[in-house]
């Protein structure tokens, strides 16, 4: 864990008093021993609270719906995956042999869970203020440069508006695959526009999230 501890000190300016918490935060359930599922559960709740509190102060006039969309954009898997890539978290994950072979250190859901697990581990190690400081540090410009409410329409809505404006039939979403245990599944959904002969796929921890990712990929193709 020395290498991981040095990386964390450099990336997050944080040192664990209890290095076992760091080990657990970086250990995926596919590996032997205690894993990060419980820490991820805790870290998710802490992240939701920290971001909610920040938005309440940062956008005092915003309505509940706008605040919810802003929070969702900040805590979704793709944002957490980008943060994980930014701090090179994948290089320090402890994975089972199967996940190693399949490139689990690059999988969005695994990276997102590990980021949240680190937040939970810091909370248990040093308390809420320390976890809040780490969250603010890794989010950086994402909190300083919040988008306007009009920029937060979800990808499915934006795709629908794009197609309707061009009188193209709406896309069809289909379930392709569900993997993982019942309490922590990953959904793979396709988005198909028959008229344009285009198809994309998206992954998410819920079917709705996967549909949004597939729609976002489709917008990228159309752009």
Image: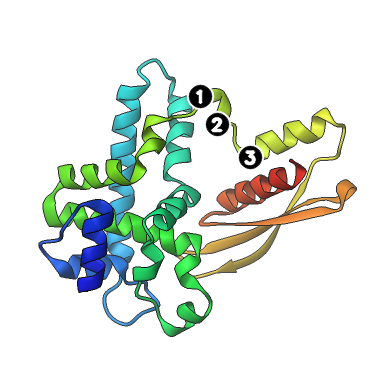
Question: From this viewpoint, which residue is outermost toward the top?
Answer: 61
Residue shown at 85% from the left, 31% from the top: 166
Q: Earlier in the sequence, mark 1 or mark 3?
A: 1
Q: Are the residues flagged by discs 1 and 2 in contact, CB closer than 8 Å?
A: yes
Residue ID for mark 1: 148
Q: Residues within 10 Å of mark 1 (few under 14, many from 20)?
A: few
Closest to the camera, between mark 1 and mark 3, is: 1
Viewer-side residue, 57 vs 34: 57
The quadrant in which the N terminus is found is: bottom left
Tell whether 118 sits left or right of 148: left
Residue shown at 37% from the left, 34% from the top: 143
Tell whether 170 sits left or right of 96: right
Instruction: Give the structural element (helix, strand or loop) at label 1.
Output: loop
Residue ID for mark 3: 155
Q: Are the residues flagged by discs 3 and 2 in contact, CB closer than 8 Å?
A: no
Q: Residues within 10 Å of mark 3 (few under 14, many from 20)?
A: some
Residue ID for mark 2: 152
Above or below, comparing residue 34 to residue 168 in the picture: below
Above or below, comparing residue 208 to residue 92 in the picture: above
Q: Position of residue 223 (x, y in %)?
A: 74, 40
């Amino acid at each position: 864990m020395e290498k991981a501890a040095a990386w964390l000190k450099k990336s997050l300016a944080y040192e664990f008093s209890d290095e076992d918490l760091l080990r657990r935060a970086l250990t995926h359930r596919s590996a032997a021993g205690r894993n990060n599922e419980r820490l991820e559960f805790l870290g998710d709740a802490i992240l939701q609270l920290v971001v909610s509190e920040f938005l309440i102060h940062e956008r005092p006039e915003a309505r509940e719906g706008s605040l919810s969309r802003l929070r969702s954009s900040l805590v979704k898997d793709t944002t957490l995956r980008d943060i994980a890539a930014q701090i090179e978290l994948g290089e320090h994950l402890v994975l089972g042999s199967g996940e190693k072979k399949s490139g689990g250190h690059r999988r969005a859901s695994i990276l997102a869970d590990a980021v949240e697990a680190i937040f939970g581990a810091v909370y248990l190690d040093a308390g809420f203020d320390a976890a809040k400081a780490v969250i603010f540090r890794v989010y950086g410009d994402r909190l300083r440069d919040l988008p306007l409410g009009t920029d937060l329409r979800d990808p499915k809505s934006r795709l629908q508006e794009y197609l309707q404006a061009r009188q193209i039939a709406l896309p069809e979403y289909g379930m392709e695959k569900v993997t993982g245990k019942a309490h922590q599944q990953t959904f793979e959904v396709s988005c198909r526009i028959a008229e344009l002969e285009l198809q994309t796929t998206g992954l998410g921890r819920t079917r709705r999230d996967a549909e949004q990712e597939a729609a976002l990929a489709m917008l990228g193709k159309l752009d």
